[in-house]
Image (cartoon, rainbow, N blue to C red):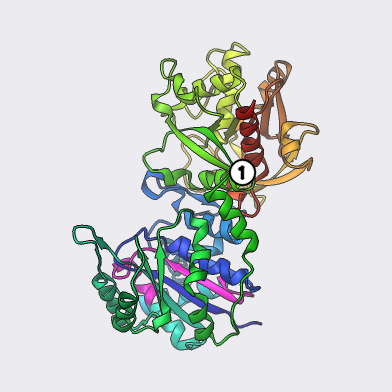
Amino acid sequence: MKQTKYIFVTGGVLSSLGKGISSSSIATLLKHSGYDVSIVKIDPYINVDPGTMSPLEHGEVFVTFDGAETDLDIGHYERFLNTNFSKQNNFTTGQIYLSVIENERQGKYLGKTIQIVPHIVDEIKHRIKNAGKNSDFLVVELGGTVGDIEGMPYLEAMRQMKHELGSDCVISIHVTLIPLIRAIGELKTKPTQHSVQELRRIGISPQIVLARCEKPLSKELKKKLALSCDVDDDSVIVAEDAESIYKCPINFLKEGILTPIARRFKIDELKPKMDEWDMLVKKIISPKNSITIGFVGKYLSLKESYKSLTEALTHAGANTDTRVNIKWIDSENLDNNTLYDLEDVDGILIPGGFGERGIEGKIQAIKYARENKIPFLGICLGMQLCIVEFARNILNIKDANSTEFDPETKNPLIYLIEDFIDQQGNEQIRTHQSPMGGTMRLGEYECKIKKDSQLAKAYNNNLTIKERHRHRYEANPKYRSSLEENGMIVNGESSNGLIEAVEIKNHPFFVGVQFHPEFTSRLQSPNPIILEFVKKSLESKEK
């Protein structure tokens, strides 16, 4: 079995420095150099997973093909590396403690006193090594900031792995902020020095410092940082703000990050093939065309809530040489008097979401797209609402609704299937009182596509696809014949007959999908239905 080499990425000074993008960029360069690369994100919070956390609290919940609800950084990893990752590529403090406690209850520790060291730390090391199996490199991103009390067991695990495996197999990269004091126009290195000192106090000396800053570091400041942080002169890598996150691997390559990595691991010079990547990045930054998409959502105070979807639009734009401008429209503020917000858009997108807030505004936007022949894509809740809108305004079922918003509705176009077989083939019982965690249809499921439909054309006439889900409610098949008789086609269904997608006849492009296509979109492989939506929006603009 190959000896995996580990790259630990920590953050200093403050959070949200872009450790996920930095980790993804390093992994991308290694993969394009011809190596097998995996990546893992460690989240120090006590939650078992982010599935029950508000998008406004944590940003988007990313769903892997095997149904794990994970941190949004896993989405970055998949988009950069064009690889499907699984539940083992993200773990939390909650999962670590839960696992250790369950082992203790089963007597696996032979009556020992359970402690942070060795039991918690051993569980962390076990999970890291498991994620790195059969890979040449494993990049390990530790969430949070050095000095946080929650992160201490993970740093101890890092220290122990370096001791056990040796410096040829484990290196540490520290991502830190070099703040710009605008009053004097000066970059300050002191916070970074203190952050590295904190790491060294724990017993970890980073080999590479990745300096996040607004403007370039002078040679003198680089040398000062190298000296004070005890790293080689070529191991201070500047990570300036970039025009696109996808330019970061190119910037890191120019900064020479692969030289100290190769030297530390005692491997040959790394020469990544980045030509195709570079071409796509240029099309993101300087495209020939542009369109505006009306993005009708309700978590707009934190745009990270829709991270995978906005990135998927970027991927589709890069592959059509088009800048996709997003016009954010708060569905709570959308009604008959404010529909003028949609007049200047080339396409309308309704994303997924939970709860009743802002629903009527989304229904108004759907009606506007349907009546005005504007290209439309509804995702998850967006598909459910386009069925409700069609039932209300075309079938004249004025009280059509989802039982999510009105459990007593007499016309539940969208309802809860109480007996449900999950991805593993186990029976789930779901009711309105079920706990939120683990009672959704999660992960990858097969969808059978209707021949000659808009959906089939988008997927290159493949009539069986696999896409990822994250929802509790389903379209009610009781109304299917009425919908189809009046012009709404069921163009996709699961192997057990659940409605997966719909479209409308005599419309340039009106598609709703129950799955989340954004979870499988990558820069080098955009999702087909989102790509088709962008193409149709571009055609609509050019008419």
- Under tag 1, what secondary structure? helix
- Horizontal side, residue 144 vs residue 411: left or right: left
Disc 1 designates what residue?
517
> In the picture, which quadrant includes the C terminus?
top right
Where does the image place residue 335, in percent across and percent down from the top left? 43, 19
- Residue 38 within the segment the image draws in magenta: no
Question: Going 42% across and 83% down the picture, which residue do you hit?
Answer: 160
Residue 251 vertical placement versus 300 (above, below): below
Where does the image place residue 116, in percent across and percent down from the top left? 36, 75
Check disc 1 and give the amino acid type.
Answer: Pro
Q: Quadrant of residue 340?
A: top left
Front residue of 395 and 239: 239
Question: Going 57% across and 69% down the picture, which residue do you hit?
Answer: 29
Where does the image place residue 249, in percent across and percent down from the top left? 52, 64
Front residue of 370 and 407: 370
Front residue of 382 and 109: 382
Tell me which segment is drawn in magenta: 131-155
Please rate how many residues cluster around mark 1, counting C-alpha atoms within 10 Å: few if below 14, some from 14 to 19, many from 20. many
Residue 70 vertical placement versus 256 (above, below): above
Q: Quadrant of residue 134?
A: bottom right
- Horizontal side, residue 70 vs residue 521: left or right: left
